[in-house]
Image (cartoon, rainbow, N blue to C red):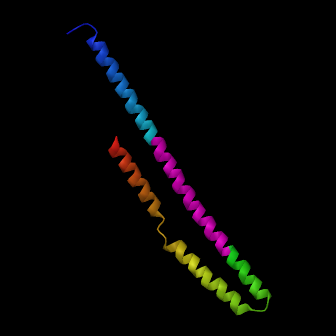
Amino acid sequence: MRPGTFEQIWREAVLDGEHRRLMNVSEARHRNRIEWFVQIIQLLRIIGALCAVIALVCVAVYYINRHAPTQGASVFGIGGIAIVGLFLGSNPNRLEGLMKTITKNTSADS
């Protein structure tokens, strides 16, 4: 063995360990951002559904004030049923499944 071999191997091991630590920190940040993204998208879905129902209520009230209660009821009823069906029928776990797929692919690339 020549002099300095241990120090060279030690330096490479330290650099490799530092690189792995940085990759783990980066992956944790990425997972955290994806989780925040999923939460924000779910909140936007709820806000969007609420705004759509409020718009339907306003249209229904407009028709009711214009002496057309059956049209107002049908607008609110059919539109409300459609929005509730979309809201309840959509799969909220789809984004979480996407997050798991992205995380799995990221881990496999490492």
Residue drawn at the location 75% of the way across and 87% of the way down: 63
Residue drawn at the location 45% of the way across and 58% of the way down: 96
Q: Is residue 65 above or below residue 100?
A: below
Residue range of the region highlighted in magenta in the rendering? 28-53
The x, y position of residue 54, in whole percent, is: 69, 74
Number of callouts in the render? 0
The x, y position of residue 38, in whole percent, is: 51, 56
Q: Is residue 91 above or below residue 74?
A: above
Q: Does the magenta stretch include residue 1?
A: no
Residue drawn at the location 44% of the way across and 63% of the way down: 94
Q: In this view, does 83 lie above or below 44?
A: below
44 displayed left or right of 65: left
Q: Residue at the top extreme?
A: 3
Quadrant (top left/top right/bottom left/bottom right) for the C terminus: top left
Q: Main SS type for the magenta part?
A: helix
Q: Is residue 2 above or below residue 82?
A: above
9 displayed left or right of 96: left
Q: Is residue 48 magenta?
A: yes
Quadrant (top left/top right/bottom left/bottom right) for the N terminus: top left
The x, y position of residue 70, in whole percent, is: 69, 92
Residue drawn at the location 32% of the way across and 45% of the way down: 108
